[in-house]
Amino acid sequence: MRSTCLIVARKEIVDHARDRRSLTSALAYALMGPAVVMLVSFSPKARGDSLPAVMIGMMSVFALVSAFTGGMNVATDVMSGERERRSLLPLLMTPVRRLDVVVGKWLAASAFALAAVGASLAGLAVVLVLRVPGTLIAHAGAFAAWAILGLAPLALLAAALEIMVAGFSRTMKEAGTSLTLVVFIPMFVGMFLVFFPVAGGWWTAVPIVGQQIALETGLRGSPGSWPQLAALASLTVLSAAAPLLAAERLLSRDDVAG
Amino acid sequence: MLDVEGLRKTYGAVTAVEDVSFAAADGRITGLLGANGAGKTTTLGMIAGVTRPDAGAVRLDGTPLPQAERRRRIGALHDHKGLYARLTARENIRYFGALHGLAGPDLERRLQRVLALLDLGAVAGRPVAGFSQGERMKVALARALVHDPGTLLLDEPTNGLDVPAVRAFRALLMDLRAQGACIVFSSHVLEDVSALCDTVVVIARGRVVASGEPRDLCQRAGCVSLDEAFMRLTSAAEESRCVPRA
């Protein structure tokens, strides 16, 4: 199974690395957050002591969103795009298991999502260094831990959700509409936590909410414990299994490739 | 050798294939002839192991095989070629070879063989996006042949091809037949069927209404041409299934 997944993943990565329009779009989404945070940092209302808090609050939302936008184009193309172009039928006529196809496509979408997260975090780090240099230096460890144990698993979960949603869409246009709602999830969570802050408890283990809390508390100097972050990371990655299995079931249907 | 026995497939209230049985021998081209919606594509899907039949059996060389094993031993080509436009012809074919479990020097050797067979060497390194319909058909056929299948299923393969491409395609099929391949060819284009098929299976409304060599079908229907025979045979089948009104 492993090598077949990697064959599918490799093909999708090579294929989509050549799609310049899609790459440019994903990079623009990833760097939009740092650009907006930089602009806001020059606002008269965000000066003095309130500046780091405002920037960190915004950064956390934009970083979460980048985990969702990074793999969106790839997920759309490899699932609904394949259905629309009728290239799914030849693929399903090979002896490859449906689960291998889904996992391979998910790995490819995840790779692009992780790259987008990396670009977004690099941009945000530059903004922090330029505008509030003390913050990043003081909390570099929390920033790195959150990036690796928070955002990386979230990118995998986001890619899995997008693979499932795009798979259930017959056309890329339909997938685009549905995936816009998926990208709205981290925005909704971010806004919710701005108005209804939750400090801890079981919320810290809930994917997306947990990541948001971990970043904000981490950069404000009270990071969660390593076991807490590890539990969040594990739960987030495990959550990806459900949408992937749903996508596998979809590909096993008789009418999916017709 | 392909044996199809009593295939049936329904989608909800719609019966796509009611009862299809036929045999296709090695070294021969067997044509499934029917109007649009007759059930040809669904039949090929069931043979190829991508659609589960409600009833019936498919045997390759006398053996009923699981769907995945059947997919390993069959090559298929569809009217929608489904190629990856940003990949080169070579990459498209290599990908499908790898999905069929080929790797390393064996995969490269088979890749070179199909590129040579289909005269694709000059364009093998170019992205498929700029290819003509004829070149796309050749790449799709090469992809279906790379794992050296004993049975080849072709669903409306000449749709959208110009006259030179159709002629080249027919020549290729005749070469493959001469090499002993079992070829099942679905079409509603009577010229293709007349020019290529050794045996014709006429399908109407999901049932086989006649089968045999083209000349036999014409004799049976009392016609000189296959298109007339096709019309008579399918019309007779339609009439026999109609409930007379009071």
Image (cartoon, rainbow, N blue to C red):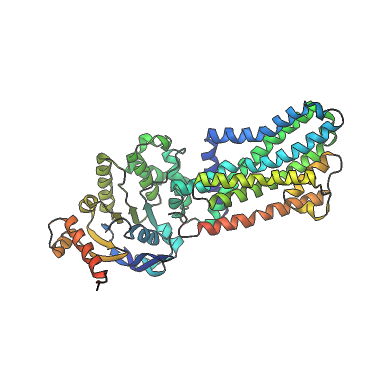
**Residue B244 horizontal side relative to residue A14, left or right:** left
Q: Whole-percent x and y of residue A220?
A: 85, 39
Q: Whole-percent x and y of residue A228?
A: 81, 51
Residue drawn at point x = 85 percent, y = 32 percent: A50
Q: Nearer the viewer, residue A234 or A161?
A: A161
Quarter of the picture holding the C terminus of chain B: bottom left
**Residue A255 horizontal side relative to residue B214, left or right:** right
Q: Whole-percent x and y of residue B240?
A: 23, 70
Number of dots carrying numbers: 0
Q: Nearer the viewer, residue B219 or A17?
A: B219
Q: Is residue B156 above or below residue B66?
A: above
Residue drawn at point x = 80 percent, y = 26 percent: A44
Q: Is residue A27 visible?
A: yes
Q: Is residue A13 above or below residue B212?
A: above
Residue lying furthest front in this view?
B246
Q: Whole-percent x and y of residue A40?
A: 75, 29
Quarter of the picture holding the N terminus of chain B: bottom left
Q: Is residue B105 visible?
A: no
Q: Is residue A88 above or below residue B86?
A: below
Q: Nearer the viewer, residue B67 or A173?
A: A173
Residue drawn at point x = 64 percent, y = 56 percent: A241
**Residue A176 horizontal side relative to residue B171, left or right:** right
